[in-house]
């Protein structure tokens, strides 16, 4: 899932942009040093390929809905992780600019969520599971597991970024229990499609697939795969947790303030609670903090701009009138500029 | 089902790209100025607290003024902005569900904070979309890449972006043709995963071959790994004025409650 | 002037899968000549073209450009002399704008920017597409793309112009304009083509390939009226030389 500007605060967005920028710089340096000129046009057209592929939808069996390829894992298999990361970044940048997909501030988040995990976590896992000359069943299974893991991590990252920003009121637990199971399903489909394309290419043009593209130290790879397995299990576990209706109902009911049924204290919920507490400690972004302030709309404005914003809402009529007027002014300015005399 | 969608997406891309060939003073400004102003705009808008609604409205003056000043087709720009509303609605919907504390009263009815913040989310989404659309419409993608590179983006990514931009339409049309070929023989059945994989596989192989030919063409004209860019760009007084003016306005609107003042003054005057 | 010389001596090329693409091809093309290389699909035309600027290395024999043998060291110099225009201009126009694409060659040659600008302008004006210099290639028509591709090669000031299927994919008017353009060039010109009418118009000399070997090498008219030869090589006469259905005469 794409992260959107509208749910993002500048602090979180800026931090993720910095992380993405560092990763881009690292991958760029790596590409430059490898000095394989053939790669330059190949990365470019594969980016266009990915873009085009994402515009085509296929039917997801049994659900009646459609999906499309994410592509990070496939690109990593074809190009190696560093090039794949840059290609995914480029596709996201073009999507943000031309199609307003996600947004400019959210680019850092999206590049990291959708580029880093498939290339640097999913792909090493795939290599480890699929081995050097995989039969198709093994490769398909490896692709599915790698894709599920990458998407789980990406989904978790979206949840963390959203909750840390404090714009959305969706509680961490609910959001997580919603996102992770869905992305298990999306990941399975992504893995199937990736494996299908790789199998096709292997049959028709085996020379294309690099035998073993260097992807950094194997120690890091092994460590990541252990983390991987743990998170996959966590994702599958949350699937089962959410399948029991009590879990979700309970968190919704609690948030809505209604009488909660007997809370289901599975280990999943306990862990999620603990994580939520950690996040709520982040200054100015835990929504408990905001919830308390919102209860007294006539609060004296604090130094924090955010609280000043809430104080403004308290005197809403003047604000609305002023807002409407400023919109009208803006439109008048725009109209005047457009119809001014001069070159057309 | 899919081929028209692919072609519609491409058409959108082409239309927006075409706007960048306009000849207004805004088009002629150095790309760096426009990129910087856009980024400051986005940061200012997204830095508002979750319950800000009225304070966001004055920010529309930026995309509106650019649209007018560069003589962009207003309906096209508006259509593209409005396109993000359904998604904004979906991502904003949890807010009224989870944030039920009443925040203000409108005509005697209590409105919960959740609805206010949902409205805020939708406004943010529109402003974010508007910012990127007008940026591309008055700057053009190659110029944006050049500006980003001068600001610090690494060369391999800049080259990658330019290639992607160049071949997007070519591959999009390739894909649309293949999807059409499938649709003509599929009898209305949606594409299965296996077929999708095979279609992508064929498209991938053609893309790979094309990359080989492009590489040969590059070598034939002396390519040795380095992309030399020519052309200069000047960041002069118009650019400085543009950046200072807009950024000043954004900061003013962000730190001072202009809408409240405007509304209070108007209401006061009416009484 | 010897540096316009294109010479193949016993050129043989065998691909990795053991297909013999070229068998002992030899010819000598001198300054200012306009030569067509024709043959059925798979006869080896494209393979031969790729040897002329060093994309492929011969299995046996050698290629000389202007008395210089084609080796790794001489490759950059030879690529400056031999300008190759590919069949699909989309493969050749890979830069985001027309101007940048035509400037690609001169910039790679390390020329100062004013010189680059002069060359680009000259090349684009020569082919008549200066007005589209700011456009991205995907927005050009087929004919415009072909001409920009030629401009991109011309900007490097080559002595020898090699074109792979120059008129393929062009509508009649674009084709006519291209033929007019090519007729005016003073470079040594080598074309591969299925468009035998264009060959008749533009090329005084023709080399016929069949299954990788040279079957004929001589004046165009003689070859294109030799029905036995054409039939053996899976070709036929150009329309201009076929008996007219209306009047039964052949325009010989």
Image (tube, grey):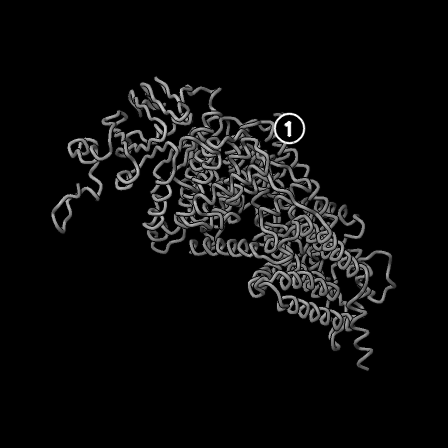
The N terminus of chain B appears in which quarter of the rendering? bottom left
Residue that extends furthest to the front in the rendered view of this protein: C1
Q: Is residue B96 visible?
A: no
Q: Nearer the viewer, residue A219 or B168?
A: B168
Q: Chain of mark 1?
A: A
Q: Position of residue B99 (x, y in %)?
A: 72, 62
Left or right: C156 in relation to B85: left
Q: Nearer the viewer, residue C124 or A232?
A: C124
Q: Residues within 10 Å of mark 1 (few under 14, many from 20)?
A: few
Q: Position of residue A131 (x, y in %)?
A: 51, 27
Hey, which quadrant is residue A84 in on the image? top right
The C terminus of chain B appears in which quarter of the rendering? bottom right
| Residue at image coords 22%, 41% | C238
Dot 1: what SS?
Answer: helix
| Residue at image coords 51%, 49% | C135
Residue that extends furthest to the top in the rendered view of this protein: C60
Q: Is residue C106 above or below residue B105?
A: above
Tally of numbered tags: 1
Q: Is residue B34 visible?
A: yes
| Residue at image coords 54%, 53% | B17
Hey, which quadrant is residue B266 in on the image? bottom right
Q: Which residue is mark 1?
A: A220
Q: Is residue A14 above or below residue B67?
A: above
Q: Is residue A220 above or below residue B202?
A: above
Q: Nearer the viewer, residue B174 or A109?
A: B174
């Amino acid at each position: 899932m794409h992260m959107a500007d509208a749910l993002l605060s500048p602090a979180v967005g800026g931090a993720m942009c910095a992380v993405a920028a560092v990763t881009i710089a690292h991958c760029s340096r790596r590409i430059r040093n490898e000095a394989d000129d053939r790669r330059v046009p190949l990365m470019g057209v594969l980016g266009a390929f990915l873009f085009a592929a994402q515009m085509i939808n296929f039917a997801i069996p049994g659900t009646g809905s459609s999906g499309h390829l994410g592509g990070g894992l496939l690109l990593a298999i074809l190009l190696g992780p560093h090039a794949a990361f840059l290609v995914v970044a480029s596709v996201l940048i073009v999507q943000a600019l031309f199609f307003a997909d996600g947004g400019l501030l959210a680019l850092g988040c999206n590049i990291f969520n959708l580029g880093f995990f498939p290339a640097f976590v999913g792909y090493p896992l795939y290599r480890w599971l699929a081995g050097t000359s995989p039969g198709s069943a093994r490769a398909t299974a490896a692709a599915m597991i790698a894709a599920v893991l990458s998407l789980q991590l990406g989904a978790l990252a979206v949840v963390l970024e959203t909750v840390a920003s404090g714009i959305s009121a969706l509680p961490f637990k609910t959001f997580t229990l919603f996102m992770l199971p869905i992305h298990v399903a999306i990941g399975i489909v992504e893995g199937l499609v990736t494996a299908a394309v790789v199998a096709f290419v292997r049959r028709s043009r085996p020379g294309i697939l690099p035998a073993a593209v260097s992807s950094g130290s194997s120690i890091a790879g092994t460590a990541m795969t252990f983390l991987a397995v743990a998170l996959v299990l966590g994702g599958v576990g949350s699937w089962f947790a959410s399948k029991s209706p009590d879990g979700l109902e309970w968190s919704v009911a609690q948030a809505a303030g209604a009488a909660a049924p007997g809370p289901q204290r599975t280990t999943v919920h306990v862990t999620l609670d603990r994580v939520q507490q950690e996040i709520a400690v982040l200054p100015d972004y835990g929504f408990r903090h905001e919830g308390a302030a919102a209860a007294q709309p006539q609060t004296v404005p604090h130094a924090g701009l955010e609280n000043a914003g809430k104080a403004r809402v308290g005197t809403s009529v003047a604000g609305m009138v002023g807002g409407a007027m400023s919109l009208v002014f803006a439109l008048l300015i725009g109209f005047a500029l457009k119809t001014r005399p001069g070159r057309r | 089902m899919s081929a028209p969608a692919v072609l519609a997406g491409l058409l959108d891309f082409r239309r927006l790209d075409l706007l960048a060939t306009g000849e207004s003073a805004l088009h002629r400004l150095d790309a760096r100025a426009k990129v910087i102003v856009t980024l400051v705009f986005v940061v200012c808008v997204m830095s508002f607290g979750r319950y800000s609604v009225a304070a966001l409205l004055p920010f529309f003056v930026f995309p509106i003024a650019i649209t007018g000043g560069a003589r962009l087709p207003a309906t096209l720009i508006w259509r593209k902005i409005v396109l993000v509303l359904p998604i904004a609605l979906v991502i904003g919907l949890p807010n009224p569900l989870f944030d039920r504390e009443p925040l203000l009263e409108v005509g005697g009815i209590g409105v919960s904070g959740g609805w206010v913040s949902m409205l805020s989310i939708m406004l943010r989404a529109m402003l974010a979309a508007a910012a990127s659309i007008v940026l591309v419409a008055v700057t053009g993608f190659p110029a944006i890449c050049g500006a980003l590179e001068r600001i610090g983006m690494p060369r391999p990514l800049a080259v990658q972006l330019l290639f992607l931009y160049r071949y997007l339409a070519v591959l999009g049309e390739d894909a649309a043709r293949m999807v059409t070929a499938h649709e003509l023989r599929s009898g209305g059945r949606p594409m299965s995963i296996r077929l999708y994989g095979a279609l992508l596989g064929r498209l991938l192989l053609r893309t790979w071959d094309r990359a080989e030919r492009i590489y040969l063409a590059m070598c034939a004209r002396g390519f040795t790994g380095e992309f030399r860019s020519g052309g200069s760009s000047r960041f002069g007084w118009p650019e400085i004025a543009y950046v200072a003016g807009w950024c000043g306005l954004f900061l003013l609107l962000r730190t001072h409650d202009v809408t409240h003042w405007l509304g209070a003054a108007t209401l006061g005057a009416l009484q | 002037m010897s540096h316009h010389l294109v010479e193949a001596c016993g050129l043989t090329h065998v691909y990795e899968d053991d297909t013999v693409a070229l068998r002992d091809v030899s010819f000598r093309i001198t300054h200012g000549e306009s030569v067509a290389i024709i043959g059925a699909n798979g006869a080896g035309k494209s393979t031969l073209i790729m040897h002329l600027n060093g994309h492929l290395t011969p299995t046996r024999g050698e290629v000389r450009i202007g008395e210089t043998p084609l080796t790794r060291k001489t490759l950059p110099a030879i690529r400056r002399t031999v300008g190759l225009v590919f069949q699909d201009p989309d493969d050749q126009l890979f830069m985001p704008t027309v101007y940048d694409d035509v400037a690609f060659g001169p910039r790679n040659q390390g020329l100062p920017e004013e010189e680059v600008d002069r060359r680009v302008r000259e090349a684009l004006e020569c082919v008549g597409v200066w007005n589209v210099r700011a456009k991205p290639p995907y927005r050009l028509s087929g004919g415009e793309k072909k001409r920009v591709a030629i401009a991109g090669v011309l900007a490097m000031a080559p002595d020898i112009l090699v074109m792979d299927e120059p008129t393929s994919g062009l509508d009649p008017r674009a084709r006519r304009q291209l033929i007019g353009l090519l007729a005016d060039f003073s470079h040594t010109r080598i074309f591969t083509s299925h468009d035998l009418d264009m060959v008749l118009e533009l090329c005084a000399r023709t080399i016929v390939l069949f299954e990788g070997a040279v079957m004929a090498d001589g004046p165009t008219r003689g070859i294109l009226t030799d029905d036995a030869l054409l039939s053996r090589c899976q070709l036929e006469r150009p329309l201009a030389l076929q008996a007219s259905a209306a009047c039964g005469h052949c325009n010989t």
